[in-house]
Image (spheres, rainbow, N blue to C red):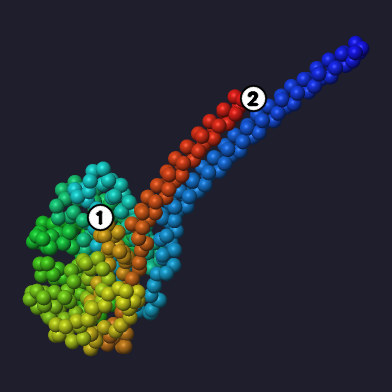
Amino acid sequence: MPFEYFYLIYWCSYYIEDMRRLLLSSAAFCGRLALWETMRLSHIFQRRENACVIGILLATVLWNECFALLLKSLFWNVPSPEPGAARFLIVADPQLIGYQDEHWLVGPFARWDSDRYLGRSFQLAMTVLKPDVVVFMGDLMDEGVKMSQKEWAATLSRFQSVYAMAEHVQKIYLPGDNDVGGEYEPVSPKLLERFRTAFPNKFDASRLGLGKISFTETNVMNGEQRNLSPAESNQTFRIVLSHVLVTTSWNAKTQNMLYDLNPDLILSAHDHVAVVYSRRARGDVHFERLTAPDLPNTVRFLSSSRHPRIELQYPTCSYRMGVKDMGFGVVQIGVVEGGKSLNVVSSLIWLPSRFHQLYLYAVVVVLVAICTVIRRVCCRAQKHVIYERLKLF
């Protein structure tokens, strides 16, 4: 074979080897480029996943702390304003959490969360309802009977912060068994005096156009009675405010008090539920009882000595009482029929369940934690595969 053929074959083989190396290096470059692009996209997806997690957490917080209450308020049954009628906001059994019964580890958070729930719902109710009078139906504090003076001062300060309101709003404060005793122990005169000093009433029925109504506070637990409005000669109607339910009491002292007062309307609380009681005859011991879900959100009736005696019992506004439904009451009262009757409109202002919101927080946090763990495990496995592939190049 001539020498030129050997020379040609040599250069062809050299060229082929050179092309092979070039192709291998190009493939290695493309492989590295693809792997780096994969890592870049992985970081982008990770950032998007982080943004998604933050968005879910933020949406949960906004719903629980803002939109749930606002949405609920759109369905509140607010009585239409009527000439000569006054509107009362009923705040029953808030029972601000104390410092002794709560575990030291969860106590600060429990007090903070409960106070926020009470305060936000109350302020929104004040804004929407614009009441003339706010009536606190008793059990303002959960540990009022046994708390120390320091704990009392701290809880009183919290109460004033939670239920801050304008000076022109009239206020009525009833003592409950958790404030002054009376359920498991006798009513304490010392605690009652402390309560009266800390929570003075500011109420004038005549300024509201209700001078014909005598408002009386009764304490079924010790038989005490107090006139909340000055006695006037033209008073035709009597409304009794009591922390404890009156109609169903079989206590002889309570029944005698009820007979002497002969009220046309009774407002009460204590049992943390909404109920309407009716006695068609004043001296009759039988009564009718209407509860949820049969109880409508708005009840309208006439009240006088010619009409059945009605007792309106209002639910607690605190989720810590362990009941399913929490809310406020609003009752609108006006004198009608030429001064012969009272027109009473009572509505229930329901609040969103805080326990459901706390459960939602727990579920979202658990799901986010599980997804985060799974994502990190997958990312570590993916990075390990990428690094192993990079070593091949």
Instruction: Choose the circle earlier in sequence order: 1 or 2.
Output: 1
Location of the C terminus by quadrant is: top right
Residue 96 — which label?
1
User: Can residue 132 be seen?
Assistant: no
Residue ID at (35%, 60%): 353
User: Can residue 184 be seen?
Assistant: yes
Q: Which kind of residue does numbered mark 2 sit on? A: Phe
Hey, which quadrant is residue 258 in on the image? bottom left
> Callout 2 environment at 10 Å: few (<14), some (14 to 19), or many (20+)?
few
Residue ID at (29%, 50%): 110
Find the distance from the CA under tag 1 to the CA under tag 2: 69 Å
Coordinates of residue 286 in the picture (x, y in percent): 16, 83
Residue 202 left/right relative to 248: right
| Residue ranking furthest to the front | 1
Indicate the secondary structure of the residue bearing disc 2: loop
Residue ID at (24%, 72%): 313
Q: Which is in the foreground here, disc 1 or disc 2?
A: 2
Coordinates of residue 220 in the picture (x, y in percent): 13, 70
Q: Which kind of residue does numbered mark 1 sit on? A: Leu
Indicate the secondary structure of the residue bearing disc 1: loop
| Residue ranking furthest to the top | 3
Residue 338 left/right relative to 258: right
Residue 349 left/right relative to 226: right
Above or below, 40 against 248 in this view is: above
Above or below, 285 against 320 in this view is: below
Residue 125 — which label?
none
Q: Label 2: which residue?
A: 393
> Callout 1 environment at 10 Å: few (<14), some (14 to 19), or many (20+)?
many
